[in-house]
Image (cartoon, rainbow, N blue to C red):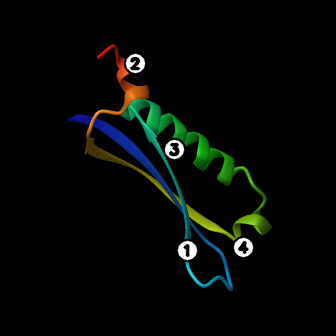
């Protein structure tokens, strides 16, 4: 098993039947947090009228996963 970090981005907009989400995985907490910061910085730099029509929040969630080939190469396993 290996630990990965799951970046979950949740969005809500008026008059939608549900929330929307997007997710990505990262091999380290640092990479996940950098992506989270980039996502939230991009959202926070939007004009207020954009933010009045969409709210979002993001989380880095640690998760024990079976080995993932592309991450095994990145960490030298």
Please tell me whether mark 4 or mark 2 is closer to you in this view. Answer: 2
Query: Looking at the image, which is closer to me, 64 or 58?
Result: 64
Q: Nearer the viewer, mark 3 or mark 1?
A: 1
Contact flag, marks 2 and 3 (Cβ < 8 Å): no
The residue shown at (44%, 41%) is 25
Sequence-first tag of 4 and 2: 4
Asked if residue 29 is positioned above or below residue 72 in the image, the reply reads below
Kindly identify which residue carries mark 3. 36
Q: Quadrant of residue 5?
A: top left
* Element class at badge 2: helix
Which structural element holds mark 4? loop
Residue designated by label 4? 53
**Label 2 vs label 3: CA separation?**
23 Å
> Of callouts 2 and 3, which one flags the residue occurring earlier in the amino acid sequence?
3
Q: Disc 1 on helix, strand or loop? A: loop
Pointer 4 and pointer 3: residues touching (CB < 8 Å)?
no
In three-dimensional space, the C-alpha distance between marks 4 and 3, rounded to whole angstroms, equals 21 Å
Residue tagged by mark 1?
Answer: 19
44 or 17, which is in the foreground? Answer: 17
Q: Earlier in the sequence, mark 3 or mark 1?
A: 1
In the rendered image, the quadrant that contains the C terminus is top left
> Between marks 3 and 1, how big is the CA–CA gap?
18 Å
Q: Work out how far the residue at label 1 is from the one at label 4, CA to CA, in angstroms.
A: 13 Å
Q: How many marks?
A: 4
- Quadrant location of residue 56? bottom right
In this rendering, the answer to whether 32 lies above or below 57 is above
Measured as percent of width and height from the top left, residue 50 is found at 76, 65
Question: Upstream in the sequence, badge 1 or badge 4?
Answer: 1
- The residue labelled by disc 2 is 73
């Amino acid at each position: 098993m290996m630990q990965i970090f799951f970046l979950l981005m949740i969005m809500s907009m008026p008059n939608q039947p549900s929330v929307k989400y997007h997710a990505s995985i990262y091999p380290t907490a640092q990479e996940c947090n950098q992506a989270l910061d980039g996502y939230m910085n991009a959202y926070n730099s939007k004009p207020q009228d954009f933010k009045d029509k969409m709210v979002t929040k993001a989380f880095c969630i640690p998760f024990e996963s079976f080995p993932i080939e592309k991450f095994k190469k990145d960490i030298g396993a």
